[in-house]
Structure formats: C-alpha cells, structure tokens
Image (tube, grey):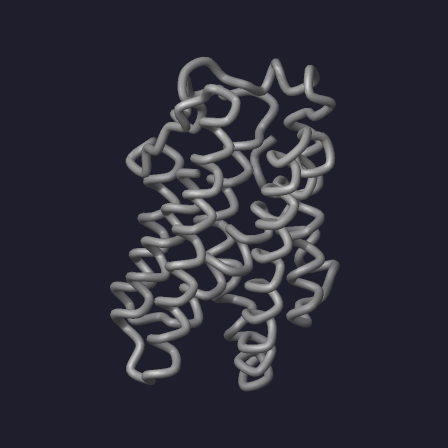
C-alpha cells in the first residue's frame, strides 16, 4: 500500500512540472489511480484482519521518493517517467503478479488486477520514451543508467536475501522474507521476477540487452 501511495505522490508532483494541459491531466489521473490501488489493498487487509501500514517515510521508500524529487527539482520529465513507470512499476507488476497467483480469493484477484493496470502504465511510458530515445540514444541511455544506479540499487536492496543494514521499515514489524515460503513465495523469486520484468522493459525501449544485463549484475544481492 505504501508503494502505491508513494506513486500517487510522485504523479502529483509530476503534474506540477508539466506545462501541457494533457500531460497535467494524465499525471493527475495516474495519481488518482494509484490512490485507488492503495485503498483496494487497505480493504483486502481489513478482510483478513490486517491493518495495513502506510509509512512513506520508511528508509527505502524515502530514498525512492528522494530520487524522484531530484528529477522534479531538475524539471526532468523524462527522468520522472523512467523512475516511476519503468523502474518502480516493473517491480510492482512482477511482484503483484506472483502474489496474485498464490493469494486466495479476492486478495489474489486484487493483486492480479492491479498488476495488469500497472502494466498499462509501463506500455504508456514505453511509447513516450522510445520517441525520446530516438532523438539521442546515447544521452538517453546515460540518463537511464544514472537513474538505475540511484533507484534500482534501493529496489534491489528491498528484495535482497537479507536486510543487512537492519530493519528496512518496508515490513510493518518483523521481516516477512523468512516466512514467504509459507505462501509459496520467496524473496529470491520476487527479486528475479522483478529484475526480469525490468530487463524486458528496457529491451522494449531499445537499450541493448548486453548493456542492461551488465547494469543488473552490478546491483546488490
């Protein structure tokens, strides 16, 4: 839920640097969609007796928000799209899809539905970014790599095997990673699926696979 609320904040911030009315409307529509996702997760939590925590100030979430705000400060619309719709949404699509397959009833249906909607965001972004890359591929790729080092490092740490720097504050209390096997999941599976989705998305942008694979191998494990 926190990730969805963070996304809503990001899109709201993006609307503030847009000058085109259509882009402003699109960003605000995305923000509303993400708030809807957060509300849906909260409802599903209540159904199973869980008060879903929301902590956008948690260590990793705060780092991700900071990376996005640096793009806002630079009025870097393309950078914002890369961070939110290529990097963050890739992890959301992959992880939600996996949970959707194993979670029972409406919980699984909600995760699967939101994964499909986030995948639409990725498709929307790819169309914009392919046009941008066509203008200057090397400049575009350099910018993606710069953001990759900033954002993907944090995302990789969130799904690393162990939280080596103490409680990362993504989980409400104790770390859930050791318990994921009880619901037929694992941190390794979620990490692998997320990175695979990320690489697939970068392929769709036209960035050479041998380049992006080298980027991913630099991430913390």
Q: What is the x, y in percent for residue 71?
A: 34, 62
Is 214 located above or below residue 56 in the figure?
below
Q: Which of 126 and 109 is in front in this view?
A: 109
Q: In which quarter of the image is residue 78?
A: bottom left
Q: In which quarter of the image is residue 138?
A: bottom right
Q: What is the x, y in percent for residue 43?
A: 45, 35
Q: Quadrant of the N terminus?
A: top left
Q: What is the x, y in percent for residue 141?
A: 56, 68
Is 135 located above or below residue 140 in the figure?
below
Q: What is the x, y in percent for residue 50?
A: 45, 21
Q: Which residue is drawn at 68% across and 55% down?
A: 199
Is 199 located above or below residue 19 in the figure?
above
Q: Which residue is drawn at 41% across and 73% down?
A: 26
Q: How many marks?
A: 0
Q: In which quarter of the image is residue 110?
A: top right
Q: Which residue is drawn at 35% across and 67% down?
A: 28
Q: Which residue is drawn at 37% across and 47% down?
A: 6
Q: Nearer the viewer, residue 109 or 175?
A: 109
- Answer left or right for 112 relative to 65: right
Is 204 located above or below residue 108 in the figure?
below
Q: Quadrant of the C terminus?
A: top right
- Answer left or right for 221 relative to 35: right
- Answer left or right for 58 relative to 122: left
């Amino acid at each position: 839920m926190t990730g969805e609320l963070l996304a809503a904040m990001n899109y709201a911030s993006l609307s503030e640097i847009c000058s085109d009315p259509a882009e402003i409307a699109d960003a605000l529509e995305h923000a509303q969609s993400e708030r809807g996702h957060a509300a849906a997760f909260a409802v599903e939590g209540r159904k199973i007796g869980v008060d879903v925590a929301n902590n956008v100030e948690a260590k990793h979430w705060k780092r991700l928000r900071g990376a996005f705000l640096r793009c806002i400060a630079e009025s870097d619309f393309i950078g914002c799209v890369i961070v939110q719709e290529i990097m963050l949404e890739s992890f959301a699509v992959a992880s939600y899809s996996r949970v959707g397959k194993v979670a029972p009833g409406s919980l699984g249906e909600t995760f699967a539905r939101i994964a499909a909607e986030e995948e639409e965001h990725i498709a929307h972004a790819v169309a914009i970014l392919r046009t941008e890359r066509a203008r200057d591929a090397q400049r575009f790729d350099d910018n993606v790599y710069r953001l990759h080092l900033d954002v993907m490092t944090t995302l990789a740490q969130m799904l690393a095997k162990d939280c080596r720097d103490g409680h990362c504050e993504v989980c409400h209390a104790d770390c859930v990673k050791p318990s994921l096997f009880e619901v037929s999941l694992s941190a390794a599976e979620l990490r692998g699926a997320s990175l695979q989705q990320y690489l697939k998305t970068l392929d769709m942008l036209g960035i050479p696979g041998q380049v992006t694979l080298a980027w991913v191998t630099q991430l913390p494990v």
